Image (tube, coloured by chain):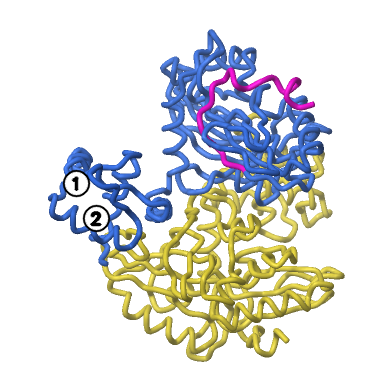
Chain colours: A yellow, B blue
Amino acid sequence: MDERSRRKLLDILRVLAEADRPLGGTRIAHALNLAGKDMSQRTIRYYLNLTDAEGLTESVGRRGRQLTTRGKAELESAYVVDKVGFVAARADALTYGMNFRLRQGKGSVVVNISTFETARAGHAIEVMRRVYQAGLSMGQRLALAGAGARLGRLVVQPGEMAVATICSISVNGVLLAEGIPTTNRFGGLLQMRGGKPQRFLQIINYDGTTLDPLEIFIKGQMTSVSQAAATGDGVVGASFREIPTQAAEAARRLGARMERAGLGGILMIGRPGQPLLEVPVSQGRVGMIVLGGLNPMAAVEEVGVPTGNRAMGTLLPFEDLRPFTEVLR
Amino acid sequence: MDERSRRKLLDILRVLAEADRPLGGTRIAHALNLAGKDMSQRTIRYYLNLTDAEGLTESVGRRGRQLTTRGKAELESAYVVDKVGFVAARADALTYGMNFRLRQGKGSVVVNISTFETARAGHAIEVMRRVYQAGLSMGQRLALAGAGARLGRLVVQPGEMAVATICSISVNGVLLAEGIPTTNRFGGLLQMRGGKPQRFLQIINYDGTTLDPLEIFIKGQMTSVSQAAATGDGVVGASFREIPTQAAEAARRLGARMERAGLGGILMIGRPGQPLLEVPVSQGRVGMIVLGGLNPMAAVEEVGVPTGNRAMGTLLPFEDLRPFTEVLR
């Protein structure tokens, strides 16, 4: 199949994936038309015969076609290049989906979903608690679920525990609700000394990667969050963002209110046009540094307990998260 | 110290680092002037007093000042943001430094430097040999050095072995010598099926990271090079580049000659303006895919032998590298 045909085939699979229910030819044609990708019903039938034959779609009678597991996998791994900038795009989509109301402390926030073996839970929980106590987490709340329980759309597997930690991208959602746009620049490894942020040691730009930078740093065991929690000196995950200069004061006030609500705050906001921790910012903007939501999990990984982490995993109601002093004991 | 003063201080440290020998105030002023960063002798003296006091520089009598170990470390970690794109910049610098002559099969090439424990050498060597045999390495040659021996500027530590593998950036050097400029786009994880490249699963752009993408994938244990070598199906490191359309034929011929010389070749070259493995390329260019030079070390890491890897470690004479059939046994 040539490149153009493959694009068309994938466009059809994408429509079926987004619908999340079976669709007939007419509805597929309509959806493609809305996306500016006109195809005749005949062309669509041609491709659906192909995808049926390849096991990517299946007919469910008069209701139309739906994606198979294999079709979903195909779409997932297709056109990785289209997904570069995916991390940045996903962040914006989730931010837009939040409906957290700061005043009531209610509504959905973006969380990271992590897992570890139940057998190691005692050790993991103790390590996480120390990170929360040291203030190196994003906020003061989290959720913990055992095998069989649900966390968002995840059903926890036997022998595993799942954790939902507040994702630092939630800060962008709170700012957005107040009309402040945030630009995500990079995720990095932040050197802490005496409990104070010093400088970034490594950087990965959000718009040039298909992998979340903080997931990478954790997998690569490049953090020393436990040590930072115990002694004040260590390397933690953090992310660098920019907001308009005029919004700096409002963001500072919102940061303080978020902190009181237990959502987690803003680590640093820079001065207009001035570098922040040696990172230059664009004209008309100030830099903003936020702690990585996965820092507690990084600490767990550091002590030799393997973790699975998905940054920006999903949206969860803030009410479903509880103070760490209740959850981690 | 404010941001501007700190910049000046670091500029002076950088001049001392680049000189690699003690310099007096006049010479420092001259070097700064050449770099377009004029400072008066008086200003320079002021900062040198500061850096002496902080232990970053030391006076060596009439010959002037030199950097201390601490000064070097300070410079190393300073301004990480200036180093974003560092991976791309370092690649270009090393390419320019090569003097490999394809006809004679002699001259310096860019190598990666890796280390592992001597105690695990038997296992490591066997795994590496299989990767070379399967053709998933960059070329057919490498160097292996035991404790106390030298590999470039590295003196191998007691209890360790060091390996120099050909870095895929060497391909750029050979093309450059024939007047063909290469643009490095990204390092990625390449899915292999039946021994053939299928598509990229993950991507990190070279111009948005301070960490080498393939080092990250290895540390994150995201490869399955051993499996690819054994069965033809697996995930290997590879990098995506672009060259001018007019140079595609010449590059193909050079690739074949490099392969015969044992330097390693070019995995794929695309067609003008056409996507290569679903990756779109700029107008007037063709895509080029090259295997990652660190694939043998990724395989070693996969079987549980910890490795230290430095992509684009240094330049070594090609003559110092020997066929894997001699070295790995």
Give the image quarter of residue A275.
Answer: bottom left
Q: Badge 1 is on which residue?
A: B25
SS assignment at label 2: helix
Circles 1, 2 touching at the beta carbon (< 8 Å): yes
- How busy is the neighbourhood of tag 2: few (under 14 within 10 Å), some, or many (20 plus)? many
Quadrant, the N terminus of chain A: top right
Q: Residue at x 68, y 46 (%)?
A: A77
| Residue B123 screen position, x and y as percent | 81, 38
Going by the numbered disc 1, the residue's amino acid type is Gly
**Residue tagged by mark 2?**
B48
User: How far apart are the two marked residues, 1 and 2, measured between alpha carbons?
Assistant: 9 Å
Q: Position of residue A34 (x, y in %)?
A: 54, 53
- Left or right of A82: which side holds B11? left
- Element on which disc 1 rests: helix
Q: Tell me the residue at 53%/64% (across/down).
A: A93
Image coords of residue B226 (percent x, y): 78, 37
* Residues drawn in magenta: B309-329
Are the residues flagged by discs 1 and 2 from a single subunit?
yes
